[in-house]
Amino acid sequence: MSTADVSVRSETMEIVEGMTDDDAVARRFQAGDDSALEEAYQRWSALVYTSAVRAVGSEADAADITQAVFVSAWQSRAGFDAQKGSLPGWLMTLTRRRIADHWRDRSRHVRRVEAVAQVEPEEPQEMAADAVIDRVVLADELERLGDPQRRIVELAFFQDLTHTQIASLLNLPVGTVKSHIRRSLERLRRRLEVDGGAL
Amino acid sequence: MHCDDDDLAVIALGEPASPEVESHLQQCARCRSNLDQWSAVVASARTVSADDHLIAPPPSVWDAIRDEVAPAATVTSLDEARRSRRPVGWLLGAAAGIGIVLGSVATFGVVTSSTEPAPAIMAQGGLDPLDGATVTGTAALEDADGEVHLHVTVPGLPAVEDGYYEVWMATADASTMVAVGTLGPDGDSILTLPAGMDVADFPLVDVSVEHFDGDPGHSAQSVVRGLLEA
């Protein structure tokens, strides 16, 4: 291999390392490339919609929330900084806000209709919404885990097998299973930090 | 010497810790924090049920988004438009951007503008107090020689600590809001609306308290709101 080949390859590697597909979509989105809006929608609308369905309990309201989230994300994209945060993280922030607005509007409506001071129902609903979003985000990230991590994590989380039982079931070294578990937990933790409700 | 993180990970799953690890955890904040965070992830993940699996929204949602952003996407984003304030762009685009409902009034305004320099009022309305506010105001949509202006007046607004007042135009149900500019300390602003904005879709004018928090969305703290009527 010639020297020129080596330098070309290392440049390519740098680009690939520094930037995931998601980052590239986020940058184009921020720059106002309208094909990036469609791509962002394809990637993250299910996350937004499912969180909304689970939090507000109505598919029609969740569809409205999803529409409002993507429209406001696009229209206020000047306020999004791809250097500072992830695009799905920002979309989830907007989703949480729309869910909170939904409950606020509803509680206002209830107050107006009944014309009676009500006990504020907002707090528990918003806290419940955060837990719901955490679950949806985790369900999404669990599905994105490749094998064998996914299989290992399923056995550990949902079948309550110990790491040694998993190692013998999957015929993998005990150390390998443990480090897959550690890496998966760290990945889930980071995803929750970015997109989860408990900020 | 810290614990092996692989050991901590399986402890987070509920497996027993060895006496050495147990005693290290008593004194080491770093390892305890890792374990706590992973344990929280495990606890949360174990509540995931089949209902939490992702479902795609109905196709109508994307169609609605595309329809809603189409004008802004082909011209400039409203935020960019607001910042750049290029008058040439507005002049060219404003006539096309005026809504169906207001179209005839606008045409009239353009035709008569050579002899009638005062802006033609296309629509106007009162702004009523919200959320315990006591002030009221007015908003008027004006055709100023081809540019569309929103003239907002809300006298007597108290100063906002670490913040400012933002003016929004919204759909009638307030489900979609577009920031169109800020309201100055004198409570009077004439805001140039972006070319390509279909004002008929945004008949609701809202003024909110915003803070310098980098959050582009509406704070949900509105002070006044009202409908524009032609």
Image (tube, coloured by chain):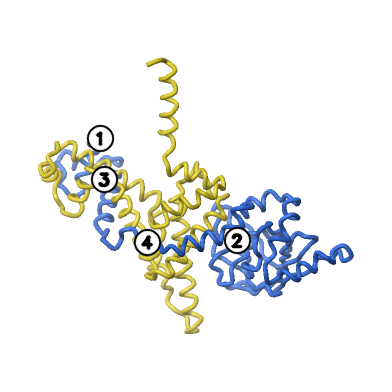
Chain colours: A yellow, B blue
Residue B180, quarter of the rendered image:
bottom right
- The answer to whether one can see residue A56 in this image is yes
Taking A13 as reference, is B39 left or right?
Answer: left
How far is disc 4 from disc 3 in space, using C-alphas? 30 Å
Q: Residues within 10 Å of mark 3 (few under 14, many from 20)?
A: many
* Residues at circles 4 and 3 in contact by the CB criterion of under 8 Å: no
How far is disc 3 from disc 1 in space, using C-alphas? 12 Å
Disc 3: which residue: B35
* Residues at circles 2 and 1 in contact by the CB criterion of under 8 Å: no
Q: Position of residue A58 (x, y in %)?
A: 39, 71
Amino acid type, label 2: Val
How far is disc 2 from disc 3 in space, using C-alphas? 44 Å
- Chain hosting mark 1: B
Disc 1: which residue: B2
B125 shown above or below B165: below
Amino acid type, label 1: His
